[in-house]
Image: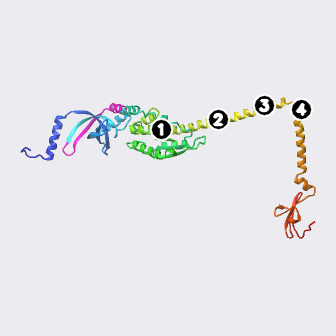
Amino acid sequence: MNNSEPLTLYSLNNLVRNVIAQELPMRYWVTGELSEVRETAAGHCYIELVQRDEVTGELVAKARGTIWQRVYSLLSPYFYQETGRAFSSGVNVLLQVKVTFHELYGYTLEVCDIEPSYTVGETARRRRLVINRLEKEGVINLNKEIDFPALPQRVAVISSSHAAGYGDFCDQLLGNEYGFVFYPHLFPAPMQGSKVELGIIAALDRIAADIDMWDVVVIIRGGGATSELSCFDTYDLANNCAQFPLPIITGIGHQRDESVLDMVAHTRAKTPTAAAEFLIHSMLEQAQRLWGVQQGIVSAVRNRIDGEKHRLLSIVQRMPVATALFMQSHHHRLDLWQKYMEASSPERILALGYSITRVNGKAVRSTADVKAGDKVTTTVYGGDFTSIITEKNDI
């Protein structure tokens, strides 16, 4: 140490402030990721800007920033208009900043301007990196290669429990005009914000724990801004969905916007209602196929019967007269046997004056079958009557 008098902390910070003001007097364009965005009641905005290693994802730099109300009131709507995204955490930005140092608050970046085109390009670049990685690893089309079930009735739904889209999906599915039966079950997960990725992956894990209970997985959200689709472009989410063992249907975006999750899913629907219609149509196709098979079987049976009729008719027509007479003779014998059977019927015999007497439900064949005091039932033509044996006379 030298012999000079020690500095107070304020003096040292003041010295740093003066050096920074002298050495860094200009405004500088700097890139980074917004890790925190906090608006105040007064209209100011405080941010945290970070830089991550592109390979490991670890933080390599961090700085606090301030956007004063007069700048933020213009910057925020301008950024949204140009990018379609809110000025929020998780967004990569190119900011024009002035480096400042305050004796009490320390090092801060004062934000003066923003370049929205950088954010648009950076978002597209990151999305392209994710797609390239999925293609290189050979997983991007795995879910599409899964055979779609013939009867997709047991539906695992990943959505926000309060989303209007989930209600629309269930109403469309359960109220279908064909009366098809579906069994949707909700696995709640956030559909916007920084927790989307982990929330959907956790829901997929819960579904996988009882994989045999489900036929398909449907991931839906009820509308939202285009900018919010970026949370569906992450590698981990896309990788989990691409390699999931059940077909996944998505209904999270808009007609013109396709997320990476849409790309890896088995089937992409535009909306939750469209996802429900896809399932209903799949059931309808199967029903129509089964109806066609049924009609084919009925037609084949009818054709076989008609063919056999024609064959038998042809055989009869070709039979000689003697054979016909032989058959006629046998018909006559059958008629005689029928008349004999009718004459020998119990009703015929009873009509001639005969009767049947039973004791305890058994026919009485001789006087040995009954004794005095027995209650017997006698059946005659037209009905029966009951008697009590008072005496019997053996012959």
How would you rate the neighbour count of disc 4 (Cα within 10 Å): few for under 14, some for 14-19, many for 20 or more? few
333 and 60: which one is in front? 333
Instruction: Give the mark nearest the N terminus, 3 or 1.
Output: 1
| 316 on left or right of 184 | right
Q: Is residue 327 left or right of residue 193?
A: right
The N terminus lies in quadrant? top left
Nearer to us: label 4 or label 3? 4
Per the model, the C-alpha gap separating discs 1 and 4 is 78 Å
Q: Nearer the viewer, mark 4 or mark 2?
A: 4
Span of residues in magenta: 102-125
Q: Secondary structure at mark 2?
A: helix
Which residue is label 2 attached to? 293
Q: Residue 360, position in %: x, y?
A: 81, 64
Q: Please tell me whether residue 153 belongs to the stretch shown in magenta.
A: no
Q: Is residue 308 visible?
A: yes
Label 2 Cα crowd, 10 Å radius (few <14 / some 14-19 / many 20+): few
CA gap, disc 3 to disc 1?
Answer: 59 Å
Mark 1–mark 2 Cα distance, whole angstroms, equals 32 Å
Which residue, given by chain and number where applicable, does mark 1 sit on? 250
Q: Nearer the viewer, residue 293 or 282?
A: 293
Residue bearing mark 4: 322
**Which quadrant of the structure image shows residue 389?**
bottom right
Question: Viewer-nearest of labels 2 and 3?
Answer: 3
* Residue at mark 2 to residue at mark 3: CA–CA distance: 27 Å
Q: Amino acid at mark 1?
A: Thr
Q: Amino acid at mark 4?
A: Ala
x then y, percent, for residue 27: 23, 33
Q: CA distance from mark 4 to mark 2?
A: 46 Å
Q: Secondary structure at mark 1?
A: strand
Element class at badge 3: helix
